[in-house]
Image: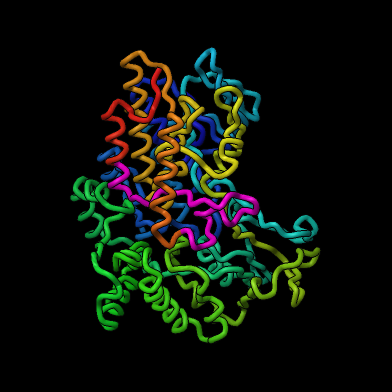
Amino acid sequence: MVVVGAGIAGLYALKRLRDGGFDVQVFEAASDVGGTWWWNRYPGARCDIESMDYSYSFSPELEQEWTWTERYATQPEILRYLNHVADRFDLRRQVQFDTRVTSATWDDGAGRWTVATDQGDTVSAQFCVMAVGCLSAAKDPEIDGIDTFAGPTYHTGRWPHEGVDFSGQRVGVIGTGSSGIQSIPLIAQQAGHLTVFQRTPNFAMPARNGPLDEARIQQRKATYRTHRAAVLESHTGVVVELHDQSALAVSDDEREATYEAAWESGTLFALLASYNDLLIDPAANETAAEFVRRRIRELVHDPEVAELLSPRTYPFGAKRACLDTDYYATFNRPNVSLVDVRATPIVEITPTGLRTTAADFDLDALVFATGFDAMTGPLLGPTITGRRGAALRDAWAAGPRSYLGIAVSGFPNLFTITGPGSPSVLTNMIVSIEQHIDWVAACITSLRERDLHTIEATPDAEAFWVDHVNEVASFTLYPTADSWYMGANVPGKPRVFMPYIGGVAYYREVCADVAADDYRGFALA
């Protein structure tokens, strides 16, 4: 089999499948392992899931021998961890680096995939595992004149490995999503002046990050197995206290105290878990949204700037909330200014900077914190051709269609790890990655034991699952936001809510039930 990608998913796929006796070849576009943590080296890059949760669970020995230093690990520490995993389990020898898969073509007669790369490789494989990540196709902004700018430009998703020195420079940052929120405070400390160009403000909560003390580390290591079991029964792949009560059923004082505790906890999902209707009832959601806006007004001294930083056009949580360190306080610095490009849109990038409808900005460097073509972008990068010459790009022209987010009708023996239609980006990604790969490994082992050669989602099962994913999303406030969950950040991309909101525990049950029922919804041959 071929595995595409050597990030968190690709490394575990290689380990799990090789242990199962399969012949595995991994192709990776980067020069080493790490996936998103190899590419995203921008200042402030770190996980928003606690380090001791954002780690593999497959090896108790690995859990005990690795010690995280911070509550929320930085990119360099996460990359060191993934390098340690690659070394410990001798994974690099089956990875071909600096190699991008350009196409995968199904041969009906042979019942195999032909996989081609930009290095001239052509490989035949019975199975193809797309471990390409959900946020790995960096997206440049659609702004005229990008190529005319005389200074350097940087994308947070393709950051120079040697780092960047902004000392004394006039820097412009376009974008205030997660990478912008993480990088802006550190760039501001270095730049002579920083101008932030914001189209849509984001909700952000304080990370309360800090060093992990020895007692906390040892307590978790002593209970890791029990904790991991609890994670699998959670909704998000993170154990948080769920409050089975409406936000509108309590007094203002009680609700304020609950939100304050969640705010102080520094846990990504804590505020959303405070009440059971925050993602269902607009009035309940507004109580949480206004709580965060009050915190912003307390943190930002200038009332006009505070208002610009306060989201009002979409519900709290309908876009992935961010964890930050001093993001809002950064706008109190005298060398930082905020430009509302919804009110005064960017017209073009010029040789000397950037022009909006209201003003020209002279800049020495530009940073594009403009995110990714999420979830579908990495899968549609290569040309994937299934039965009867059908292209995945055409099959997904109106939006992604899959069965369980892991298989696509018409594309036998192709597995999409944490693909559209699975919980993926709404969860702790490592939990969802391990679940998918364990399911794939068990599936193909079963095929081998029964001398079966192909597995393919049926059109009816795929249609049922797509309808189910859309139906449960429609009960929530998620589709009301122009988010990358909906593909809204990419012009021309179909507006479809891509992840599955059923949660880790329920989704695991569904997948296990499908497998136990002789892979119900799949055609085996």
Residue 137 horizontal side relative to residue 351, left or right: left
With respect to residue 233, does 307 lie above or below?
below
**Residue located 24% across and 68% down the image:** 245
Secondary structure mainly formed by the magenta segment: loop
**Residue 435 image point, x, y percent:** 34, 39
Residue 51 horizontal side relative to residue 480, left or right: left
400 or 132: nearer the viewer:
400
Q: How is the image coloured?
A: rainbow
273 or 115: nearer the viewer:
273
With respect to residue 106, does 245 lie above or below?
below
Q: Which region of the structure is painted magenta?
A: 479-508
Residue 16 seen in this snapshot: no
Residue 138 seen in this snapshot: yes
**Residue located 49% across and 72% down the image:** 327
With respect to residue 273, does 96 lie above or below?
above
Total numbered labels placed on residues in the image: 0
**Residue 425 image point, x, y percent:** 43, 51
Asked where in the image residue 264 lies, by quadrant, the reply is: bottom left
**Residue located 27% across and 83% down the image:** 253
**Residue 190 image point, x, y percent:** 59, 70
Image quadrant holding the C terminus, namely: top left
42 or 376: nearer the viewer:
376
Residue 419 horizontal side relative to residue 212, left or right: right
**Residue 364 image point, x, y percent:** 73, 67
Look at the image and say whether residue 321 sits in the magenta stretch. Answer: no
**Residue located 49% across and 78% down the image:** 329
